[in-house]
Amino acid sequence: MSGTIRDPVHGAIRIDELERCLILSRPMQRLKGIKQLGLVETVYPGAIHSRFEHSL
């Protein structure tokens, strides 16, 4: 089973089963709670990127 990731810049990105398993893995999912830009969101409210989004 493969999947698709929708990206605003690159459009639809197809992923295979191995990539899907890696994305759904516990270590990768843990990155959702870590901010990529630290306290930048206090100055730029729209800057709310996580390490997960950055890694994708």
Image (cartoon, helix red, strand yellow):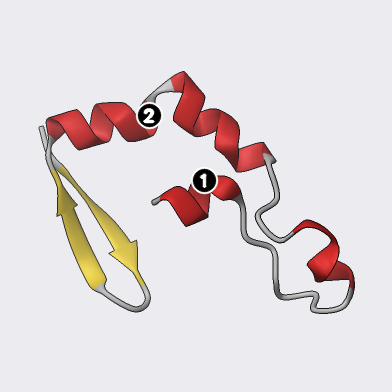
In-image side of 51 versus 46 (left or right) = left
Q: In the figure, residue 34 lies in which quadrant?
A: top right
Around disc 1, counting alpha carbons within 10 Å, would you say few (fewer than 14), some (14 to 19), or many (20 or more)?
some
Which residue position is annotated with label 1?
52
Query: What is the distance, in whole Å, between disc 2 and disc 1 at their CAs?
Result: 11 Å
> Percent x, y for residue 35?
70, 50
Location of residue 3 in the rendering, given as x and y in whole percent from the top left corner:
18, 45
Left of 27 or right of it: where is 3? Answer: left
Q: Where does the image place residue 2, in percent across and percent down from the top left?
A: 12, 39
Point out the image quarter for the N terminus. top left
Q: Is residue 21 left or right of residue 28?
A: left
- Residue 31 shows which numbered tag? none
Q: Quick check: 14 left or right of 52?
A: left
Image spot of residue 55 (x, y percent): 44, 49
Q: Is residue 44 above or below residue 34?
A: below
Residue assigned mark 2: 24
Give the secondary structure at mark 2: helix
Q: Mark 2 or 1, which is nearer the eye?
A: 1
Height in image: 34 above or below 38? above
Q: Residue at x 59, y 41 (%)?
A: 32
Task: Kindly state the secondary structure of the residue where label 1 is placed.
Answer: helix
Q: State which quadrant residue 7 falls in.
A: bottom left
